[in-house]
Amino acid sequence: MARSEDLRFRAGDASLAGTLRLPDREGEGRMPWVLLLGSWLPRDRDGACDRVRHPAWFAPASPSEPSGLLLRLADALARRGVASFRFDPRGCGESDGDWASTDLFTRIDDARDAIGAMRSRRELDLRRTAIVGHGESAAIALSVAIGDPAIGAVGLIGPGARSWRDLLRRGVAERERTGADREHPLVAALDRWSEELLERARRQEPTASVAVGEAPLELRLSGWLQAIHTPALALATMLHRPAVLAHARGDAWAHPDESRLLLEVLRAGGNEPAFQLLDAREHDLADAPDGAIGAVAEALADRMQPRELPPVLIAIEEMGSPSD
């Protein structure tokens, strides 16, 4: 049986909490592993809406609501002999910090720190590492992978390809048409004030306040400006790694065409990416069957081939050898 271990790691000035999921592979040596990154809204390490720290921002969970996407992925990977690590973003779950004031570049640094923390674990194979980004975390996954030669595969689930400005406008129109996720006060507020927030970010104003229900929320806008100027499409031109893309057919946050754009760019770079268009409506694949989640995990595991390590990671690998 797979087992889970809760732990904390340092990320800059913060202490972040996460869960390491380890498959039952005792005696088989180091195991491949994946860092799992959730989408942009306040979420816990499992990829579910963070109703503990932000109960007024989300509608109550329904009794039939499935586990979060990252937990489902972690379980699917473990069944295939692949370990994973997922963590609460700043200001969510048990992690330090404030979600509303955390910008994109800080989230990228936090992901790098999470990888650094896991490289001290003797169970994990430094030569077979992957990273998965859901939604807006596609840009984070790409940014980290581009700068880290030891990451051998990249997974992008429901990614946006173009500028955050374009994605948000298209998403607002789709949610207005379908009502998707509008039951959440935070989503309704952000959609209502989206144009003003984008304009204030363009003017490089530091913050903006929106009303979520009856409470004001002060948003730091530097992260919005960073996201506008850091589209995943541009980052994908610099990636030279195997990639797996998956997208819900009815995604109201990023249209499947966004994955198709990334697919073209990745193919042009010689990456030979895989693409799975899933028969689901939810951005977080809540309505996707376990078999579809398993297919994504399978495709990623198949692409986690051993990588050559830079000298510093070879030294870390040798220090962590079970024979020491």
Image (cartoon, rainbow, N blue to C red):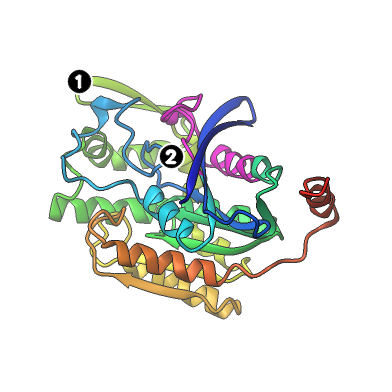
State whether residue 164 appears in this view. yes
Residue 211, how many percent across, how many down? 25, 25
Residue identified by numbered label 1: 214
State the residue at coordinates (22%, 60%). Answer: 281
Crowd class of label 2 (few under 14; some 14 to 19; many from 20; radius 10 Å) = many
Question: Spatial distance from mark 2 to mark 1, Cα to Cα?
Answer: 27 Å
On screen, residue 159 versus residue 256, left or right, reads: right
Q: In the displayed structure, would residue 92 be above or below residue 76? A: above
**Residue 268 is drawn in which quadrant?**
bottom right
Q: How many marks?
A: 2
Residue 101, how many percent across, how many down? 47, 28
Q: Amino acid at mark 2?
A: Arg
Q: Amino acid at mark 1?
A: Glu
Q: Secondary structure at mark 2?
A: loop
**Residue 93 is drawn in which quadrant?**
top left
Q: What are the residue bounds of the magenta stretch?
A: 86-115
Which of 70/255 is in front?
A: 70
Which of 207/71 is in front?
A: 71
Residue identified by numbered label 2: 45
Give the number of the mark in front: 2 or 1: 2
**Residue 171 is drawn in which quadrant?**
bottom left
State the residue at coordinates (82%, 55%). Answer: 314
Which of 80/52 is in front?
A: 80
Q: Secondary structure at mark 1?
A: loop
